[in-house]
Amino acid sequence: MKKFAKYTLCIAAAASVLLFTGVDSKAQDKVADGVCVDDVNISNMTEEEAKAAIEAYEAKRTGVKITVKSDGGVTTTTLADLGYKMKKNDFVKHGMNVGQTGNVIEKYKERKDVSNGGIRFEAEFEYDEEALKAFVNDECTKYDIPAKEPQMVKKTSDYIKKNSCEGLFNFVPGMNGRAINREKTLKDLKALIDKNKGEEINIEPLVEDTKPKYTVDSLEKCKTLLGTYNTNYSSSSSERKVNIKNAVHFVNGSVVYPGEEFSILKKITPFNAKNGYQKAGSYAAGKVIDTYGGGVCQVSTTLYNAVMRAELEVTDRSCHSMCINYVPVSFDAAISESSGMDFKFRNNLDVPIYIEGYTESNKIVFSIYGCETRPSNRKVIYRQYVTETIKPGADVITKDSSKPASYRKVTQGSHTGYKAKVVKEIYIDGELVSEEDYNKSSYKASPRYIVVGTKSTTTPTKAPDDPTPATQTPDTTDKPSTTDKPSTTDKPAATEKPAATEKPADKPAATEKPAATEKPAEKPATEKPAATEKSAEKPADNPKPADNPKPADPEPAAPAQPE
């Protein structure tokens, strides 16, 4: 009995101590004393206060600035830009649960222990490693100085000797570059971020010399004419001629190294006045309209045919929406800056190639030089096959009320549509050993567009000089009807002598002679527009191929080209 009373007294005493220190059975509304998150003390804070303190700490950590200083300049970012953030946690909840489990004595003991010794929660952070890689590869390298590959420059603009260009090039050696060591920079940054506690990160990456991939020796092998082609643009407008010369200038002198892809769109754009282009005719939505750079498709088409003859790998080529007339059907390569339509090819040879381009006597000439490895007894022929011909639809007539009814103008000629393909044939010693479809093309048909006038041109009718109509005035004729004298009425027998009047009327010689007058009158009305129609049928973007060269060896027969 005494023993039981003793235990009861101890429990009562402990309970009184707990009550005195503020510990009861109810859940506490503050973080226990002695709780920290890293170096942030959240003791005795309410839940909201503790969360705000932790968020402020996270903001400080994520706002840390990273500075990378290289030879050329300084690149900066922040940890926040790299997706740096604190991992999800229950620090506040755990801090408020201290001394809330077990019996009264256990609760008291836990709180006392925490108050004396403290509890420290270690915050963990994470970041986007892909964002860090992008920062190193894209931003930290912008001050790199790339190595310059060796170049070759044509000595003269004279036409290249057949199958050999020895002595016609000067070679310029390449130059070393400077670049940061990306792999080491990435590794160093990761280590600094992982151990960062809120201080700024500064790094000077390792910068190394970089060498050109190729040497002058490799360029000196580029001495053979692999393929050449030319097209005529003599019928082009002055604006179109400017565009053609400008685009050819951008392509001329290009060196394409083994495995590299050449994009003509990248070489000659943007199409604007600042880049030397003027407005000229080009195809859009089945019509010919004026745009900056109109006519450059003839440049890409000419280069395409030179590439075909050099047998380089074409990676991107599109035909025009409607036929053009400076090369046969399916031998064209259309480009468009707005749609991204491009002509691309890859150098699939073991040595670099050189592209020479120039304009001369209203001709575009492209020649491709490299190292010839094809045997001399091998011949390539590109044959064209038209699989379908599509006739233009009915004329599209537009009425113009501001023009006289005699006005008629063809604003755009019709275009015949085609479906066609080119087949590549390879002959060894004159014998066909291989043939394959090289490309396929589809061209839309387009009707003529004609504007006709509808304005009325009627003029007041002048009274004729013939005396006969004067006697037929109704008022004068009706008035005599008041005089009913039959004798006056019968007398018209003399008037009825129309035989005399009708006789000359029946004489075709006098009345129908105007046939001679009608003939010249018809001539200007109908024949003159015909001349307008014919010239209007030639789109501004389509000069005639007067001196169009034949594709590699025999030129495949082409269907009649639309004007």
Image: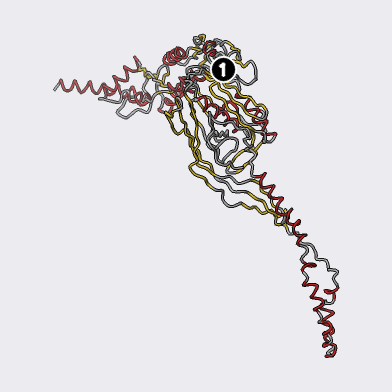
Place of residue 5 in the rendered image (x, y in percent of width and height, measured from the top left): 18, 22
Between residues 74 and 163, which one lies in front from this camera angle? Answer: 163
Picture colour scheme? secondary structure
Place of residue 217 in the rendered image (x, y in percent of width and height, measured from the top left): 53, 10
Place of residue 254 in the rendered image (x, y in percent of width and height, measured from the top left): 58, 21
* Number of numbered callouts drawn: 1
Q: Residues within 10 Å of mark 1 (few under 14, many from 20)?
A: some
Res 79 visible: no
Task: Give left or right: position of 232 versus 258.
Answer: right
Looking at the image, residue 122 lies above or below residue 462: above
Task: Identify the amino acid type marked 1.
Answer: Ser
Quarter of the picture containing the C terminus is: top right
Residue marked by disc 1: 164
x 57%, y 13%: residue: 72
Task: Give left or right: position of 516 versus 241.
Answer: right
Place of residue 400 in the rendered image (x, y in percent of width and height, measured from the top left): 69, 53
Looking at the image, residue 519 lies above or below residue 16: below
Res 328 visible: yes
Local secondary structure at mark 1: loop
